[in-house]
Image: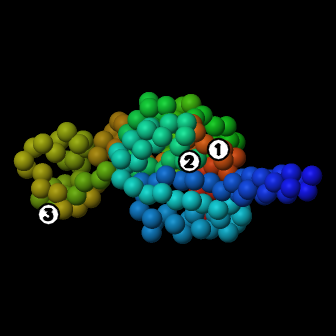
Amino acid sequence: MLKKLTATVLLLCSTQVLANEVNVYSTREEQLIKPLLDAFSKDNGVKVNLITGDDDPLLERLKREGANSPADVLITADAGRLHRAVEAGTLQPIQSAKLNQAIPANLRDPANQWFGLTYRARVLFYNPAKVQANELSTYEDLADPKWRKVKMFFPNQRDRGTHINISGAGVTKSAKNKENAVKLLEYIALDDA
């Protein structure tokens, strides 16, 4: 009886350790994301196991691993790759009032499979000695050889606005630590993060 009880206690202890972890696959450079993940661990008592890699190979790895993947969260620096992760069936929808409040609808997947965390604009530069700002309006205008850019402007302001790209994250379909994965996304979506 004592051996069976000991085995049960050990099993419960190992399950508890797993419950306090979250596994992250990230295409962000480790030195850029690690301080944020360390702060999350310190504030929440959840150990973050980080795997970093290039975008396409990491997504391929996640697809190959399928349901056996240890990844709970995928973080990537490109909206197109987030879309491809959804198409590949590697992410799952999650419901989080905190994420919905922190992230505008246009910066998250309509089905809540990924959430934009940062964004960056594609801006252009022009030489103000040669060009007046009011002469510039669209990306398409740049095909004209007269535009030699050395000062920044934001194109397409009359209609659709400047093209932006996002870095974002989603909870993997195979997530075994879904609660901690959602908690991590909520944490890194905060303004302080």
In whole angstroms, how far apart are the C-alphas of marks 2 and 1? 7 Å
The residue depicted at 43 percent of the width and 38 percent of the height is 64
The residue depicted at 54 percent of the width and 31 percent of the height is 110
Whether residue 97 is visible here, answered yes or no, is yes
Q: Are marks 3 and 2 in contact (CB under 8 Å)?
A: no
Front residue of 98/56: it is 56
Q: Does dot 3 land on a helix, a strand or a loop?
A: loop
Q: Does dot 2 land on a helix, a strand or a loop?
A: loop
In whole angstroms, how far apart are the C-alphas of marks 1 and 3? 59 Å
Q: For residue 176, which numbered disc appears in the image?
A: 1
**Viewer-nearest of labels 3 and 2?**
2
Where does the image place residue 12, in percent across and percent down from the top left?
80, 53
Does 23 sit above or below residue 96? below
Nearer the N terminus, badge 3 or badge 2? Answer: 2
Direction from residue 153 to residue 38 in the image, left or right = right
The residue depicted at 49 percent of the width and 31 percent of the height is 89
Direction from residue 135 to residue 167 in the image, left or right = right
Direction from residue 187 to residue 159 in the image, left or right = left
